Image (spheres, rainbow, N blue to C red):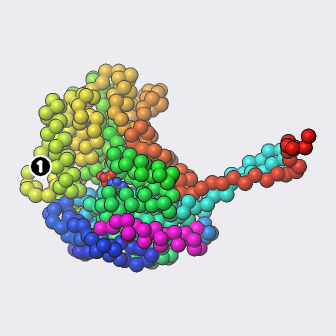
Amino acid sequence: MTEIPDKIEHFIGGRLVPSVSGGTFDVADPVSNRVYARAAAGDADDVGKAVEAAAAASDGPWPGLAARARARILNRIADGIEARGERIAAVETFDTGLPITQAKGQAARAAENFRYFADVIVAQHEEAFSQPGQLGYVLRRPAGVAGLITPWNTPFMLESWKLAPALASGCTIVLKPAEWTPLSASLLPEIMTEAGVPDGVFNIVHGIGEQAGAALVAHPRVPRISFTGETATGQVIMRSAADNLKGLSMELGGKSPCVIFADADLDAAVDSALFGVMSLNGERCTAGSRILAERSVYDALVTRLAERADRVRVGDPSDPSTEIGALVHTEHYDRVMSYVRLGAREGARLVAGGRRPSGLPAGNYLAATVFADVTPSMRIFQEEIFGPVVCVTPFDSEEEAVRLANATRYGLAAYLWTSSLNRAHRVAAQVESGMTWVNSHNVRDLRTPFGGVKSSGLGREGGQHSIDFYTESRIVHIALGETHVPRFGVS
Ligand code: NAD
């Protein structure tokens, strides 16, 4: 039985502390929807203290440590995560409703993020530029205090995806976890301390986005904000960050197409399309939530998707046989259900799910849901639902497939299924998405740029892109001989 705390505190300057105001907010689990803990509700005062601690640590030895020394600490963090893998997964499953087998995968990936950026930082080298008479070389410096604001879906893994490169770069950190899922982040202080992260380098302020998050974004001593969350929140953050001209990384929403041509391996395409949208409860930014299918195979695909969706096992997230668990929060569950009702009202054909599964009278459960005959004018085609709901739309030509793929404001991911090499390259070049996979679902190479175009984001994370974000590059120009200087004021 996983031990669950009933109190969650901030972590500031190496100590667990309550809010300055003494304020708390309630945290519930998505299976019983009962409040299991009260978490410290941070505001500008708590953020001020955390930034003060992080800024002081930024003036200390941390930013100047040899890359190898920082890498050792990152590897020890990874060790700490791996040693607690079962516990992290159990806690994440309890708090988010993610199926336990998938939560275990996310915990393993979190450790891998730290190991990966430990390797990146020791291999880091800088550019030099040589031309007759002049040599230029780059000095790279940590940006200072990084504000990390994270969402409730796969929270531990997404936190690690920002923490690892920020620490590797020599930044100090204030993390603001999502208020619906603060539990797994509360394991980080022990892991960081045990790994040797100096006090003040890593801080957490819990709280409501509009209070704790907004205060972090507005703080003048935080030059970088890495945000993952909804597009609308990202827009609010950009406005606020403008006052201090902060560097922003924005990983936002998606409504990604999965385009299946008739010449594809249809068995593999069905497997991948279902997994791509139903895994992680469909609460996945890169979910292929719009399946576009070529007309000649459309009816057969809809039938197969519906049959398979009907057999997806929805249930207790802690049961290893569960494929879809409980949606994160009653508010989110109501929102997803409202889209299910909207789809029916808009005239889409419900071919699977759309209801609470039988035998699960309580908890935020929804059967895997498939809507067919969805048209681009429908809101369920355009808007991010962020649950186990997929829309299927037919197309008649490659041109129409591209047009439909690009017919939303989002552009995070795209999945293409075809056996034609020429078509794969042609379509990949035309689809407006930050990341495209051909004949595959979302398999990541951590070196590659991660991020979206259009309303799905700004900037890229992953590999060198993350290091560039958390550091400043400065150029030094050295004259190698005499420099010709036009002489002013001599005539
Ligand atoms: P959200 O925008 O509601 O919240 C994200 C975080 O921002 C939370 O910590 C929240 O407290 C904070 N926040 C809210 N208002 C704020 C404000 N005014 N100032 C500062 N911080 C504020 O998002 P969510 O509902 O937690 O997450 C789901 C969304 O995240 C989906 O849209 C999903 O697509 C997106 N997402 C994107 C990626 C990606 O990499 N592109 C990855 C995961 C999730």
Quadrant hosting residue 256: top left
Residue sitting at x 50%, y 66% = 172
Other-residue count near label 1 (Cα within 10 Å), few / some / many at <14 / 14–19 / ≥20: some
Viewer can see residue 109: no
For this view, does 434 lie left or right of residue 353? Answer: right
Q: Which residues are magenta?
A: 41-63
Q: Nearer the viewer, residue 197 or 47?
A: 47
| Location of residue 311 with respect to 214 vertically, above or below | above
Amino acid on which the number 1 mark rests in the picture: Arg
Residue sitting at x 8%, y 56% = 361
Give the residue pinned by disc 1.
356
Q: Secondary structure at mark 1?
A: loop
Q: Nearer the viewer, residue 304 or 176?
A: 176
Residue 454 at x, y percent in the picture: 41, 37
Residue sitting at x 26%, y 34% = 381
Residue 2 at x, y percent in the picture: 25, 73
Residue 46 at x, y percent in the picture: 38, 70
Q: How many discs appear?
A: 1
